[in-house]
Amino acid sequence: MKRWDVVVVLVALAVAGGLYFSGLLRADTPGGVAVVYVNGVEKARLSLLQDTEYRVETEHGYNIVVVKDGKAEIIDADCPDKICVNHKPISFRKESITCLPHKVVVEIEGGNENSVDAVVQ
Ligand SMILES: [Zn+2]
């Protein structure tokens, strides 16, 4: 019985350790971050945990990026096609909104897909 108990404890420790370290890996992006790129250059990192508004100025025009209720979206822009403005809000890892005319990309980094992170925060 005792030997079996040791095995159980070791397995529990291994699982807890794995969860702990996977949590550490994501610690820099709790709840996800909306990263704003202009022409491939990172311009801003907006935490999805905090409602905010960010105006992107490019040589072609502007985009207004808004973070609200854990989601990021472009609410306004002076680009001709307005595809970015019409895009639905994004919140999951690797989702992105692209404004081709302005070469603006908003991409989600980090984990909103893991609700454990939100609880920790
Ligand atoms: Zn656009």
Image: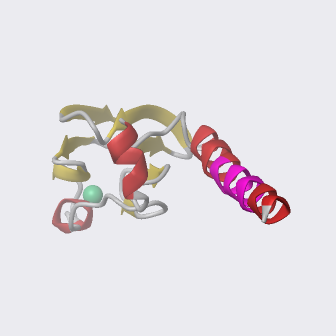
Residue at x 62% of width, y 43% of height: 20
Magenta part of the protein: which range?
8-16
Residue 14 sits inside the magenta stretch: yes
Residue 28 sits inside the magenta stretch: no
Percent x, y of residue 76 = 14, 49
Image quadrant where residue 51 sits? top left
Image quarter for ligand 1: bottom left
Residue at x 67% of width, y 56% of height: 12
Residue at x 25% of width, y 32% of height: 54
The answer to whether any part of residue 85 appears in the image is yes
Magenta span dominant secondary structure: helix
Percent x, y of residue 66 = 20, 42
Q: Which of 82 and 32 is in front in this view?
A: 32
Q: Which of 1 and 81 is in front in this view?
A: 1
Left or right: 98 as drawn, with respect to 10:
left
Percent x, y of residue 16 = 63, 50
When the figure is inspected, residue 106 is found, relative to residue 56, above or below; the finding is below
Color scheme of the displayed model: secondary structure
* Total numbered circles: 0
Left or right: 60 as drawn, with respect to 35:
left
Left or right: 117 as drawn, with respect to 8:
left
When the figure is inspected, residue 45 is found, relative to residue 88, above or below; the finding is above
Percent x, y of residue 33 = 41, 42
Q: Nearer the viewer, residue 1 or 61?
A: 1
Q: Quadrant of the C terminus?
A: top left
